[in-house]
Image: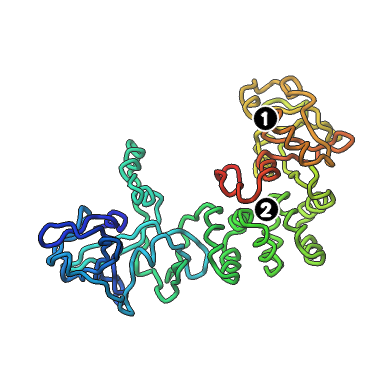
Amino acid sequence: MFFLSKLLGSRVKDVEDKTVGRLYDIVVTTRPVYPRVTALTVRRRGKLVLASWDVVSSFEESGTLLRVAGNTLTERELEPDERLLATAFLDKQLVDTEGRKVIRVNDIQLVRTGEDVRVAAVDVSSSAILRRIGLGRVSERLSMGRQKPRPRLIDWRQVDLSQTDESWVRLAVPRTKLELLHPADIADLVYELSPDERAAVLDALDDEVAADTFEEMHPSFQAALLVDMPDEKASELLEEMSPDDAADLLAALPDDRRAHLLALMEKDDADDMRELLSYPEDSAGGIMTPDFAWVRPDATAAEALESLRRQNEEVETLYYIYVLDRSRKLRGVFSLRELLMTPPERKVRDFMTGNPIAVRTDASREEITQLIAKYNLLALPVVDEDGRLHGIITVDDAIDLVLPPAWKNRLPRIFR
């Protein structure tokens, strides 16, 4: 058994034990169900030459030996049924026949069958990535004391070569249990698809994953996709997105399309969208998210923790918990760490920080970024003229305000 990643770049020697070059790729014929290796592509003195399989005397991860002299190798065109294995399949996105999963081909498994070597499977595991960059042993050390990570293989019979192009490979049968890539990675992949294919992949993804993927896409792609997306799918996607991101997207749509989608959304979600859309785009009100964690000042620490468990799926962040009175005026704030370190019977009013730093809904982006930077805040509350809390601006939203798109793309995923 071989993995393609361990073969590529290995040394190729000729019949006189002289180095010919390095293995660049493997040529396979796609006529059999399991493609058979027909030649090796060798990089020799800056050129690619082919060594037919019949001149290969030894083929191992440690290197390849040939039965002929290196200077006899020449270039040749591939036959119609031949493919360069690494070039054609490695790092391509893998989509099932219903378009419901997208995952990257991280490695390819080959096996010996008599005198032949054939392609057996594709490896979609994360350990394959470490193996490819030469950190396979690091992966093994990290897993010491635990079950050794295994390849996650998809049988080659499930690859539909007739539905494969330069950016993606289609599976011949659905694989409903494939692990999804991170939504940011899916967004990177769908950029390479045609508009119709891009819409099909988003339409087939689960609503939550589709929304997370959508948020990772460039605004111009978002608006274009949403205009043509079926009404029901578009409204569901907007409801799953972060309210501030969804409101920004709605603001970019034509008035009639925006009104139509708002009418299809759940009332609470639509009300949130309308409030956010009522503020100027660059104001604190237009930037904030209305999803924040809050408790009453007379609650005990134990009651506050139970309240947070109920709010967990609805809030943007649990870094800070805000304290509101019966009229929803902001009275204080505390961190999750403070809550966990506080005796369960102690009242919130006794350990909260009063008079927290906040901005009005009409505050400018300059005021927002200055306050977050000055006080090292992870989130900034947004209040109206009466002190009622309407939303929060998180630190990642603040980064979006000050960095141009080209720089934002360089940030680690945690800040995007």
**267 displayed left or right of 118:** right
Comparing 391 with 184, the one in front is: 184
Where the N terminus falls, by quadrant?
Answer: bottom left
| Residue drawn at (56%, 65%) of the image | 201
Task: Tell me, for residue 241, which label it has, or none.
Answer: 2
Residue 298, compared with residue 100, is above or below; it is above
**327 displayed left or right of 265:** right
The picture places residue 314, in percent across and down from the top left corner, at 68, 45
The picture places residue 79, in percent across and down from the top left corner, at 30, 78
**404 displayed left or right of 104:** right
| Residue drawn at (20%, 55%) of the image | 63
| Quarter of the rendering containing residue 263 | bottom right
**41 displayed left or right of 296:** left
Q: Secondary structure at mark 2?
A: loop
| Residue drawn at (31%, 73%) of the image | 33
| Residue drawn at (35%, 70%) of the image | 157
